[in-house]
Amino acid sequence: MSLTAAETTELLPAREVQLDRAVRVGLIGGLTAMFIVTSGMLETFDLRMIVDPILSLGYVTLMAAPFAVGYVAGKAPPVLEGYAAPSVGARNVQAGAIAGALTGAIYALYALIIHVLDFSSVFIKLTEQTKKIVTLDMGAGGVLILALVMAVSGAVGGAVHLLERRWKRAVLYSAFWVVMFGLLEVLVSQIAFVRRISAVKELLYGTDAGLTLIGAVIIGGLVFAAYYYLDGRVRAATRRAMALEGQQRRRFILISLGVAIVFLAVLPQILGPFLSEVLDLAGVFLLMALGLNIVVGFAGLLDLGYVAFFAVGAYTTAILTSPVSPKWSPELSFWTAIPFIILAAAAAGVMVGTPVLRLRGDYLAIVTLGFGEIARILFLSDALKPYFGGAQGMLLIPDIDIGPFTIDDSISFFYPIYAFVILFAYLSYALQDSRVGRAWMAMREDESVAEAMGVNIVAAKLWAFVIGAIFAAIGGALFAHKIGSVFPESFAILVSITVLVLIIVGGMGSVPGVTVGALALVALPELLREFAEFKFLFYGTLLIFMMLNRPEGFIPSRRRARELHLDEVEQDAWLAQAAEQDPAPAE
Amino acid sequence: MSTTDATPVLELRSVSTHYGPIQVLRDVDVAIYPGEIVCLLGGNASGKTTTLKTILGYVKPSSGSVHLEGQRISGLPTTEVVERGISMVPENRRLFKRMTVRENLEIGAYLRSDRDAVEDDYERVFELFPRVKERLHQRAGTLSGGEQQMVAVGRALMARPSVLLMDEPSMGLAPVLVQQNFDIIQQINQAGTTVFVVEQNANMALSIADRGYVLQTGRIVLSDHSDALLSNPEMQRAYLGQID
């Protein structure tokens, strides 16, 4: 911020780093460290090396806590109008160090207590192994060392704020990516190219999972250089691209589309079967997420039983295509089954949508939650076993044929799944700008006024349910063909919740946000299967964090961001209004 | 203005409305003629809002009927009532605050397919309220109270209604804004829109209306020209706050 001399004199003193905040977050950091130890995360994570042999994921996690609190503590408070911008300096580091030291102190106290006393009958994860890890296998001295490292980690977290933006980003991201690469050895080593040239893998990873020291330096260096170089340039290039007009713009769009298509076409071939499998699963969730995004993100109808539609799609295709479906087996192909899947989904959408037309908000959520469970229980029930196979499910769902090609493995399934993803993403955009999209938008804001403006609420709600149901059903059908069978237990409530988490974290109402959310939150846990027991803990933590800090999601729709940050602007409007009108209150 | 020979734009013929077993409106007769401003006065729980809801088709009258330009509209769903030419400025404006002013106006014209005429109506609204045009791409929630009122009226006008309903335009507003609101009503009326105002503030409403009806516990107890109502002693005692 540049200020003229005259302006500067009028400014109030800067609101500097708050030390009481450092104490507060330091306590939080200490509790987090205790939790990491007690929950068994430390022990499980310690088995996995990030940088061999010096750093395990366990210690990364443990040290991330003081670093994070140090970062928060060292942050300057936001600059308010009328206040001078705070200066950066020793205070930032000091605040970070205080927070980190507090975290370390609490950790040390806890570590010593569990070292001396035995709580393992209550906290079963406090095993001998965990105790070794918390003390570096060196008794009280090891605890002290770790506590000191934590204080330093906090100070480093605070010191990050001293860096210029460009450096700061480059440093933080290179640390992040070193950890990611250390974690995702599977990802790198499964890529066909790397498999062929084993020297690359050996250089980066040696023989184990986890980077070698040299690998860590290479990755860190490359990422640092990339961020340092790209800072600002990407945005500038995007702006230039957006500014293109007419012929040039069309050509730009065509070229980018071409590049994207070629990229998607070769992607599964490069990634190999294991990673394609992961992407396929993410794609199925993405289809559901795009559908739920219409119901929740566009129309504002909170549906917690969304998995029911996924199940309807899977079961419809199972009945129609499998030769051994219990009651009736027309043995259609996937493609001829599609119209029936769509019809079944639409019927299910109307069936769920009609009774809940008059419900809003919480009530709607609870009723749809019930519907989701009813669907699963119906498919599971003995009464309907002659139709749906009960707990045994249905088997032998055939592969998909496209002309001369048979879609039968994870690499080839990538194509139909992502073809539908692209189609549905396009439809989402088209719907958003359509008449019914406008109706949804108005309905989400104020249902009764929208109705008074002539919006047909019944139709708008049913359309949202029906379209959402169709998206999910196609996802379910592809899923069924992919695994070749359907079982009622695949359609548990957790699927609905997961999809909801995807769109909330990604950015509700935003197609790119939902895409990133699905890829990150479905693919990542698949790659980190060994930590599967902590998956929902991770989801929960992420959800809380997002709700508190960035409720509009990672990549928000512009509109949603507006909505969630409206309060501040409305405040301004209210002030303007107050100035405009009489000070006397109404009536 | 003639109130006898022309067909009424909007007519309630002995409308009774029930919420379950409770009768809210009792044989309400109201007729509004082209070009008029008519007000419906009444205190809390007199049935004013129910009258509007009945006209718009949110609730169905248990007996009697509502007619728009001679055609029966009671029993039709709200969407169709709006399509036939009734639009409303709701109490407290109730703009779609997070949508832009432009999007608010678009929703106002939601049911119309005559694109060219819609474009003309944008111009008409901008002519009435130049401020609205200035704020077109701003979010409605960021506008001042007066501007929001203009957008609310503009949104209702975008439906090109035969009759515009206004629910409590003075509700919860500072006196300056109330005055501004009633100026707006007069302005759009002079531009050719028939207006039906439902209002508690009898003084204010009668100062701009041609005629008024007084609703008491669901029954029309008085109806007359505004001047006559203003000087009616009963009226003065009950609604105009004058103690003699």
Image: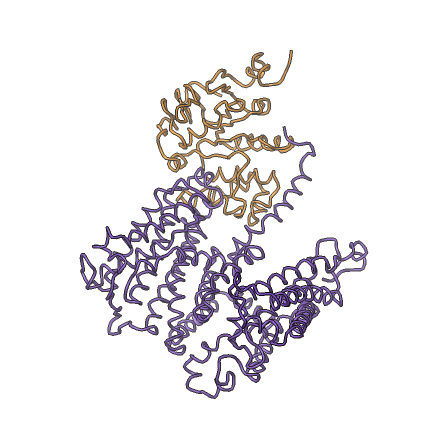
Image-quadrant location for residue B6: top left
Q: Is residue B15 above or below residue B88?
A: above
**Looking at the image, can residue B118 be seen?**
no
Tell whether A476 sits left or right of A119.
left
The colour scheme used to paint the residues is by chain
Tell whether A180 sits left or right of A364.
right
Callout count: 0
**Looking at the image, can residue B113 be seen?**
yes
* Residue at 48%, 82% in the rendered image: A208
Image-quadrant location for residue A223: bottom right
Q: Is residue A351 above or below residue A262?
A: above
Image-quadrant location for residue A119: bottom right
* Residue at 45%, 27% in the rendered image: B50
Q: Position of residue A509 (x, y in %)?
A: 47, 55
User: In the image, which lettered chain appears purple?
Assistant: A
Q: Position of residue A107 (x, y in %)?
A: 64, 66
Q: Position of residue A11 (x, y in %)?
A: 78, 55
Q: Position of residue A412 (x, y in %)?
A: 32, 73
**Chain B image colour:** orange
In the foreground, A122 or B168 = A122
Q: Is residue A263 above or below residue A84?
A: below
Image quadrant containing the N terminus of chain A: bottom right
In the foreground, A336 or B11 = A336
In the foreground, A228 or A368 = A368
Image quadrant containing the C terminus of chain A: top right
* Residue at 36%, 76% in the rendered image: A273
